[in-house]
Amino acid sequence: MIEIREEAFKYYFHFMQKRMDIFWKRYEGSPYPWTDDPILKEHKFTNVYRSSDRVSQYLISNVIYNNTKHCSEDDILLRILVFKVFNKIETWEYLIENIGEITINNFNVAQISKLLSERIVKKPIFSSAYLMTGCHQDFLEYSSKHERWLIMIEREFIRKKLFKKIIHAKSLENIFNILSNCPFIGDFLAYQYAIDFNYSDIINFDENSFVKAGIGAIRGIKKCFINTGDYTNEDLIRYTQDNLEKYREKFGYANFKNLFGREPTLIDLQNCFCETDKYLRVKMPELNIGNTRIKQKYKKSSSNINYFFPPKWSINDKIEKKCIQQNMTELTLFW
């Protein structure tokens, strides 16, 4: 039997509603501040929809679907993987400026590693969003983390043709399993990368067909549920999805406005448990599970987003391009 902790679980739906309200107010060009929630106003939180965050938007618009008509399927997946390893727009643009568009044919580990070694002296090359260890016994001879990652990509994905296996995978879970068996890539990154590959038109699986809870989401789930019986964390994310309308009504958030007609999928709900964990650190500090504070403060930015989503979702024609709002520098943070 599943037993929820109502006083905490209601804030899962509160977060979704209030954070989505912020998204729409900014989209419509409303003036700052976009919320009266003091926690959301002070601290940095990702969007309800993973695909609408700044880095995901850049990945979709610039890495996957821009200037890639000449690219092979392997090229597209390589571009996604290289971008996501660093998960930093500035690093990607630095590489493009110095070596041109990244493809299998111009993926030169020595050249890229040298460029990044020069870059890291002045600026960070990895995002702080994910913990990228870069530790594995087969790569200890290489001194820098970025070189180890690049060599791993060359060995596993290019030489051993893992991209081909991913292209011919039968399910999202199959892609997850392929990735999770690679050096450096644990379950969390494997799921994130599988979703990123699935933004392309090369991979096309339902985002609701598979989910894997990350550490932050697990903390949020533990705060929101009291008794879970034999159900896994993934089962509880699916339970939440199956009962979205029920709990929206129960907690007073029935007027949730989704993303151009697209309801949150399992990856979004997983992410919202992570963000709810962060929210509850401030709202209900007595639920002390793991980290006790939010490390990132909100900073208003003047950068703009022209929203674009995978064409196969059929929602781009619903976006008013003239409504480009100011966007914070949003990073998916898992602390």
Image: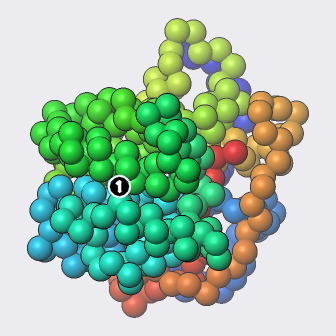
Residue under the point 25% across and 31% down: 174
Residue 66's spot in the image, x, y percent?
A: 25, 77
Any part of residue 89 in sight = no
Q: Is residue 259 left or right of residue 304?
A: left
Coloured how? rainbow
Q: Could you say which quadrant of the image residue 307 lies in?
A: bottom left
Kind of element beneath mark 1: helix
Task: Point out residue 250 in the picture as x, y percentages from the top left corner.
Answer: 60, 38
Quadrant hosting residue 329 = bottom right
Residue linked to disc 1: 81
Task: Report the residue at 55% width, 50% height from top.
Answer: 143
Picture layout, residue 46 above or below residue 280: below
Identify the residue at image location x=29%, y=33%. Answer: 178
Q: Is residue 64 above or below residue 228?
A: below
Find the residue positioned furthest to the right. Answer: 286
Quarter of the image that includes the C terminus? top right
Q: Toward the viewer: 297 or 104?
A: 104
- Which residue sits at x=21%, y=39%? 160
Which quadrant of the figure contains the N terminus?
top right
Closest to the observer, 259 or 142: 142
Count all numbered tags in the image, as a single digit.
1
Q: Is residue 43 visible?
A: yes
Q: What amino acid is found at the position of numbered circle 1 in the picture? A: Leu
Q: Is residue 160 left or right of residue 252?
A: left
* Relative image position of residue 165 (x, y in whole percent): 17, 38
Neighbours of disc 1 within 10 Å: few (<14), some (14-19), many (20+) = some
Please indicate whether residue 62 sits to the left or right of residue 217 in the image.
left
Taking depth in this image into account, of 240 and 217 the one nearest to the observer is: 217
Seen from this angle, which residue lies furthest bottom? Answer: 322
